Amino acid sequence: MKTIDSKTSNERLKHIRLKQGLTQVKLATLSGITQPNVASYESGSRTMGLNAAKKLALALQIDYKDLI
């Protein structure tokens, strides 16, 4: 039986980024999204749209559905 991940998208983003050993600055560079926006997505103060999720997922080499 598969466990359902109850983390929110901002928690998942931060967890995956840290697991891959990336800083917010490096993820921002790889994704083309500014570091302040990456920080806002991770803190939950800004909602991640589909376009941003796709860019971040591409940079993290994961499926964007893992972030939403």
Image (cartoon, helix red, strand yellow):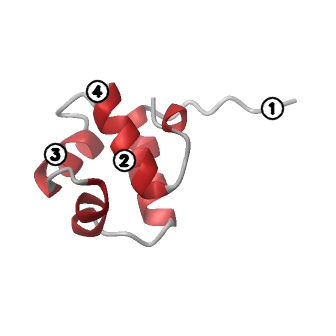
Amino acid bearing label 1: Lys
The relative height of residue 1 versus residue 38 in the rendered view (above or below) is above
Q: Give the image location of residue 33, x and y in percent.
A: 20, 50
> Which quadrant holds residue 54?
top left
Amino acid bearing label 4: Gly
Task: Determine the CA span between mark 1 and mark 2.
Answer: 25 Å
Callout 2 environment at 10 Å: few (<14), some (14 to 19), or many (20+)? many
Task: Determine the CA span between mark 2 and mark 3.
Answer: 11 Å
Name the residue carrying label 3: 37
The relative height of residue 1 versus residue 21 in the rendered view (above or below) is above
Q: Residue at x 36, y 47 (%)?
A: 56
Q: Give the image location of residue 61, x and y in percent.
A: 52, 55
Task: Determine the CA span between mark 2 and mark 4.
Answer: 11 Å
Q: Residue at x 16, y 57 (%)?
A: 35
Mark toward the viewer: 2 or 3: 2
Q: Could you say whether the residue bearing mark 4 is in a helix, strand or loop?
A: loop
Q: Could you say whether the residue bearing mark 3 is in a helix, strand or loop?
A: helix
Task: Determine the CA span between mark 1 and mark 4.
Answer: 27 Å
The relative height of residue 67 versus residue 62 in the rendered view (above or below) is above
Q: Could you say whether the residue bearing mark 2 is in a helix, strand or loop?
A: helix
Q: Is residue 10 something one can see in this rendering?
A: no
N-term-proximal mark, 3 vs 4: 3
Mark toward the viewer: 1 or 3: 3
Q: Give the image location of residue 3, x and y in percent.
A: 75, 33
* Circle on res. 2: 1
* Circle on res. 56: 2
Q: Residue furthest bottom?
A: 21
Callout 1 environment at 10 Å: few (<14), some (14 to 19), or many (20+)? few
Amino acid bearing label 3: Asn
Name the residue carrying label 4: 49
Task: Determine the CA span between mark 3 and mark 4.
Answer: 11 Å
1 sits left or right of 24 in the view: right
